Amino acid sequence: ETGVTQSPTHLIKTRGQQVTLRCSSQSGHNTVSWYQQALGQGPQFIFQYYREEENGRGNFPPRFSGLQFPNYSSELNVNALELDDSALYLCASSSFQGYNSPLHFGNGTRLTVT
Amino acid sequence: AQKVTQAQTEISVVEKEDVTLDCVYETRDTTYYLFWYKQPPSGELVFLIRRNSFDEQNEISGRYSWNFQKSTSSFNFTITASQVVDSAVYFCALSDNFNKFYFGSGTKLNVKP
């Protein structure tokens, strides 16, 4: 069973730039969620994708956007980067919608905005 | 609104000591799920346990045990005979009907040899 994989592992960008983070979900999972984890904090929900459509969004501005592909992999795009966007971005997959599905997380992408 | 509070920011124990990590949650939902995750320095969140709101039985898995008390909205996690490998940040989380997870701020556990 292949777990959740994310790329890249680390990224350094300049304020105002755009970034794309990638995630391959665990085999058999059709739902992908993205979380932002600032240093010393718990993960914060960004959004969730199910069957290639956004299905639920947290308190993040529209410059955070995403995609899910037919193979259930996903991208997180952030435009007009701000210093506060520096964080660990975690992708998680689950087998189906519903509140009883554990999320399986990748190792994350560490984004630094300078 | 959903909220999870982990009041203990950091705990240090000596190997073989027992340690309890506290978790208090708030929700208006009658049906919900609670989770515990472990985050080692590598960054990956590792799923430990899931508990639904209708099951208040305590659970034991090896050295780990969980105490769910709906009356006090608490879901505490105890590690018995702690080991150095238990050192990590532990997160308690609550999920809603859309599988959106609300995480606490985490408790960093340091187990010293």
Image (cartoon, coloured by chain):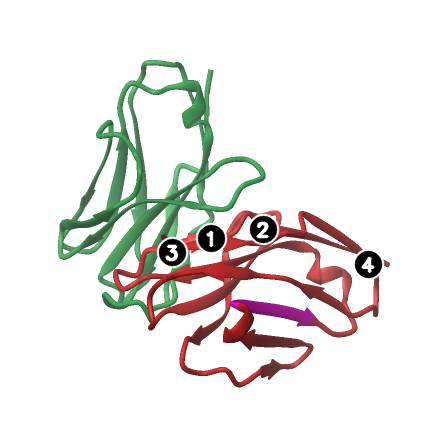
Chain colours: A green, B red
Q: Residues within 10 Å of mark 3 (few under 14, many from 20)?
A: many
Q: Are marks 3 and 4 in contact (CB under 8 Å)?
A: no
- Chain holding disc 2: B
Badge 4 amino acid: Val
**Distance between the alpha carbons at the discs numbered 1 and 4:** 24 Å
Q: Which residue is mark 3?
A: B101
- Chain holding disc 1: B
Q: Which residue is mark 2?
A: B106
Please check whether the numbered discs 1 and 2 fall on a single chain. Answer: yes
Q: Earlier in the sequence, mark 4 or mark 2?
A: 4
Examine the image and state in which quarter residue A32 appears. bottom left
Q: Which residues are magenta?
A: B73-78
Residue at left offset 74%, top offset 74% = B80
Does A38 sit left or right of A26 as displayed? right
- Chain holding disc 3: B
Residue nearest the observer in this picture, A77 or B53 = B53
- Residue B75 magenta-drawn? yes
Instruction: Please tell me whether mark 4 sits on a helix, a strand or a loop.
Output: strand
